[in-house]
Image (cartoon, grey):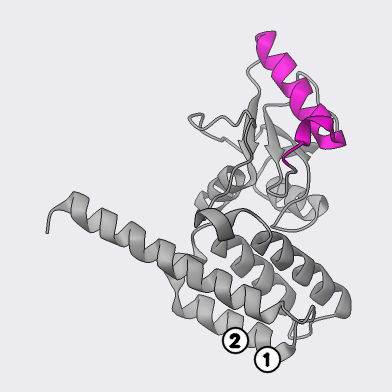
Amino acid sequence: MEPAIAVAIGNRNLTKASQVLMGIVTGITADAHLHDLELKMLSTWLTANEEVASTWPGSAIARHLQDIMADGVVTEEERAHFLSELQRIIGADFAETGSVSPEVAGLPFDTSCKLEVRDSTLCFTGTFVYGTRAACEKITTAAGGICTSTLSRKVAYLVVGTHISPDWVSTSYGRKIQSAMDLQRQGHPIAILSEQRWLDAMRAI
């Protein structure tokens, strides 16, 4: 089989498997409550489907699920937060497009720059699938990055959470994005990255 054909088939299979995952998530969130058996079933499915669990958004779901189940006890707060994240994921335009990495039109993401976390200053804005902003900053700091809540010329990367409204320009996090764009126009080499790009870089460390 030609390499290009094999890649195309692999991509189609991954998309189908990701759609199966979205179907599972839709099913277990239908009653607005995550039961322990449902969490265990989701964890088992992700373990058996490693390729999906290493690709967005399965990677974010798997990491979040692993974190809340690590101590063997899922608190109601953890359960409610995870439910909210799953509902947001299936509420994205995935259902309409079949895309495993939905983008909001007009977001000026840098897709070619390499993310060097160590000794770089990162600023996070928006709402993240991975977890709270504090959780994102924690693993970034552990990887040698420097986190700040204030956008300035010291910031090398602005990381934008996945849950972005189509009218992001009028939101509070939209103002940070616009400020970063202004810095770019002034010649400052700040990169605007999606949560997926940031998570991919974190996995590579």
Seen at 67% across and 11% down, the residue is 185
For residue 72, above or below residue 46: below
What amino acid type is highlighted by mark number 2?
Met
Name the amino acid, label 1. Leu
Q: Name above or below for residue 156 compared with residue 137.
A: above
Q: Nearer the viewer, residue 141 or 175?
A: 175
Circle 1 residues within 10 Å: few <14, some 14–19, many ≥20: few
Instruction: Determine which residue is flagged by label 1.
Output: 37
Whether label 1 touches label 2, CB < 8 Å: yes
Whether residue 118 can be seen here: no
- Residue 41 numbered tag: 2
**5 displayed left or right of 58:** left
Magenta span of residues: 166-187
Estimate the spatial distance between the alpha carbons at disc 1 and disc 2, rounded to whole Å.
6 Å
Q: For residue 120: magenta?
A: no
Relative depth, front residue between 153 and 44: 44
Q: Residues within 10 Å of mark 2 (few under 14, many from 20)?
A: some
